[in-house]
Image (cartoon, grey):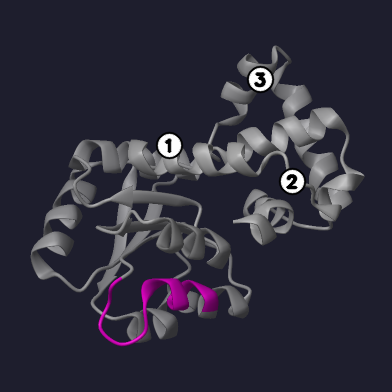
């Protein structure tokens, strides 16, 4: 199996080097490059085409969130893991709306970061526990609202999408709803088709974006 190709965008040298060291120790990961600014990343990431970018938010110049927005416009496929000290709601949701699929705090132990990278590559949405709790709370608070985008979905499809929005893996959704992994994949395929989106981040943003 080919290693997961990674890029780190982080302006603090000690943080970047420490994380790089742990990545290089894992034979399942390949570090392609590191960048100190979002401006450099915007130019180079479409050429490097990594599987996953570990992205800081508070960078000199344009932010990591704006960097993601600009990369998304290029159409080059890659996933973004936010890696930051920020855990306030605005930063979290701006990152997710921009296209991030994971959100870890910098105080996360290195081995957990490595596991989160692998989880993200396998289709999960890893998040630090405090971030996940914030998301669950806010989605539950907004559940009484309505969204016209979700009106095309069946009740079961809405359940699946809500669990996806909470960061659950396909197998976890299957266990939660007591259905098969294959059935979960079928539901998600139907959700994408009905919402006219290509991935779960777009689906979540389309249904929940106006409410968060």
What percent of the width, then of the height, locates residue 148?
86, 54
The numbered mark at residue 145 is: 2
The numbered mark at residue 174 is: 3
Q: Nearer the viewer, residue 169 or 35?
A: 169
Q: Find disc 1 in the rendering and name its residue.
A: 133
Query: What residue is shown at x 55% (from left), y 40% (from top)?
Result: 123
Query: What residue is shown at x 38% (from left), y 58% (from top)?
Result: 82
Q: Secondary structure at mark 3?
A: helix
182 lies left or right of 136: right
Q: Nearer the viewer, residue 50 or 19?
A: 19
| Tally of numbered discs | 3
- Near mark 3 (Cα within 10 A), the count class, few <14, some 14-19 or many ≥20, is some
Q: Is residue 128 visible?
A: no
Q: Is residue 125 visible?
A: yes
Among the two numbered marks 2 and 1 on one chain, the one whose residue lies closer to the N terminus:
1
* Start-end of magenta stretch: 58-69
35 lies left or right of 167: left
Is 13 part of what is drawn in magenta?
no
Among the two numbered marks 2 and 3 on one chain, the one whose residue lies closer to the N terminus:
2
- Point out the frontmost of discs 3 and 1: 1
Q: Nearer the viewer, residue 166 or 200?
A: 166
Question: Cα distance, mark 2 to mark 3?
Answer: 26 Å
What percent of the width, then of the height, locates residue 31?
29, 59
The numbered mark at residue 12 is: none
Q: Residue furthest right?
A: 152
Question: Cα distance, mark 3 to mark 1?
Answer: 21 Å
- Near mark 2 (Cα within 10 A), the count class, few <14, some 14-19 or many ≥20, is few
Q: Judge whether 168 appears above or below 42 on screen.
A: above
Q: Secondary structure at mark 1?
A: helix
Image quarter in which the C terminus is found: bottom right
Q: Are marks 3 and 1 in contact (CB under 8 Å)?
A: no
């Amino acid at each position: 199996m080919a290693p997961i190709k990674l890029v780190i965008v982080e302006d603090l040298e000690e943080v970047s080097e420490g994380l790089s060291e742990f990545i290089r120790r894992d034979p399942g990961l390949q570090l392609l490059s590191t960048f100190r600014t979002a401006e450099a990343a915007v130019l180079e990431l479409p050429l490097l085409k990594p599987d996953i970018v570990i992205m800081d938010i508070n960078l000199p110049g344009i932010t990591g969130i704006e960097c993601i927005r600009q990369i998304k416009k290029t159409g080059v496929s890659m996933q973004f893991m936010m890696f930051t000290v920020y855990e306030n709601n605005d930063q979290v949701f701006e990152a997710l709306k921009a296209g991030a699929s994971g959100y870890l705090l910098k105080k996360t132990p290195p081995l957990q970061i490595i596991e989160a990278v692998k989880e993200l590559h396998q289709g999960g949405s890893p998040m630090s526990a405090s971030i996940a709790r914030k998301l669950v709370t806010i989605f539950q608070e907004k559940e009484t609202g309505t969204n016209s985008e979700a009106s095309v979905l069946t009740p079961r499809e809405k359940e699946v999408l809500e669990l996806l929005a909470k960061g659950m893996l396909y197998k976890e959704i299957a266990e939660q709803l007591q259905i098969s992994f294959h059935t979960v994949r079928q539901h998600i395929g139907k959700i994408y088709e009905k919402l006219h989106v290509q991935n779960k981040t777009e689906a979540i943003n389309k249904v929940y974006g106006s409410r968060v």
